[in-house]
Amino acid sequence: MRPPFARQALRKMINGSGIATANKINTSRRAGFTLIELLVVIAIISVLVSLLMPAVQQARESARRTQCANQLKQLGLAFHNHHDQYDYFPAGGWNWNTPPSYRDGHPEVGADQRAGWGFQILPFIEAANTWQAGTEVAVGQTNSVFFCPSRRSPQTITTSDNYVPPVTGSTIKRALCDYAASNRDGSGVVRRFVPRRFRDITDGTSNTLMIGEKRLNRAFLGSEQEDDNEGYTAGWNSDTMRSTQKTPLPDFNGLGDGDDRFGSSHPGVFISVLADGSTRPISYSVDSRVFENIGNINDGQVVSEF
């Protein structure tokens, strides 16, 4: 039989242990979440995310639009540097099926160059190696400066070699382009065959469209469509030239192509670079007559607001 003091000590140990265990259990229960509380927290987080997403998307689009404008600025500067070196702007090339032309291994320039303005400005966008590498390399080599980040990353397609004369005789890879020069109507800064000069722009360089984003059907990006299959080197083709007699429209998903129009994946506007090298957004709601005027270098209609 245990002494009284031993029995008392044992009872204290048991009672103390029981209390501690109960406290631990109660504390554990208080620290957890009930299912209802968890669902409420999840609902609150979902609401916050839904409220923040539009702001995040707007911030991302703003950054992409700024990058697009910077790329167009580079293209405008390339046009100016081309003029500084040769005393004329790049020309619009010869035809959609005329590949970049070389003489004695060197790219031809001016009216002798059959490829379009995209090929002709390569030395002025840090792509002289591509320019000099020969037709097949030049046609298939992408350059990030030609692609709007709101629309796509640099992209190529492989098509039949329908060049005259043929380059490979079978298929050929073509690097695409998101920008086009003004204009397909023959009254713009970039003209077919024969290049223009600064002195030809009598309506003022700050009032005349030179390059801008082109409208595309997003449903067929990465596959052959009429205005996005010849690539950035294309001569006098809607891949690289657009009309100012048609008002600009945004990209779309559906049937058809960009319909020779300027446009973009940006909401409300497309980005342009004027003949003075400045960039500016142009609204899709621009007056059709005004848009035609800013595309024409010498119609006598000087437009300051558009």
Image (cartoon, grey):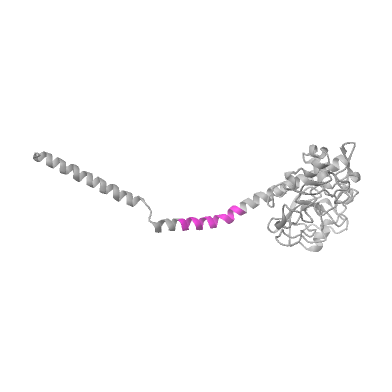
> Does residue 209 appear anywhere in the picture?
no
Return the x and y of residue 6 as percentages of the image width and height.
12, 39
Image quadrant in which you'd find residue 297: bottom right
Return the x and y of residue 12 as percentages of the image width and height.
17, 43
The reply, left or right, for residue 144 in relation to residue 13 is right
Residue range (magenta): 42-57
Does the magenta-highlighted stretch encompass residue 56?
yes
298 and 182: which is toward the camera: 182
Image quadrant in which you'd find residue 169: top right
Return the x and y of residue 232 as percentages of the image width and height.
79, 48
The reply, left or right, for residue 88 in relation to residue 149 is right
47 and 197: which is toward the camera: 47
Does the magenta-highlighted stretch encompass residue 274?
no
Quarter of the image with the C terminus is: bottom right
Q: Who's the residue at 70% across and 57% down the image?
A: 219
Q: Who's the residue at 62% across and 54% down the image?
A: 58
> Does residue 83 appear anywhere in the picture?
yes
Q: Who's the residue at 16% across and 41% down the image?
A: 10
Q: Who's the residue at 29% across and 49% down the image?
A: 25
**Quick one: which residue is furthest to the front in this view?**
170
In this figure, what is the number of numbered marks? Answer: 0
Quarter of the image with the N terminus is: top left
292 and 205: which is toward the camera: 292
Return the x and y of residue 302 as percentages of the image width and height.
84, 57
The reply, left or right, for residue 128 in relation to residue 109 is left
Chief SS of the magenta region? helix
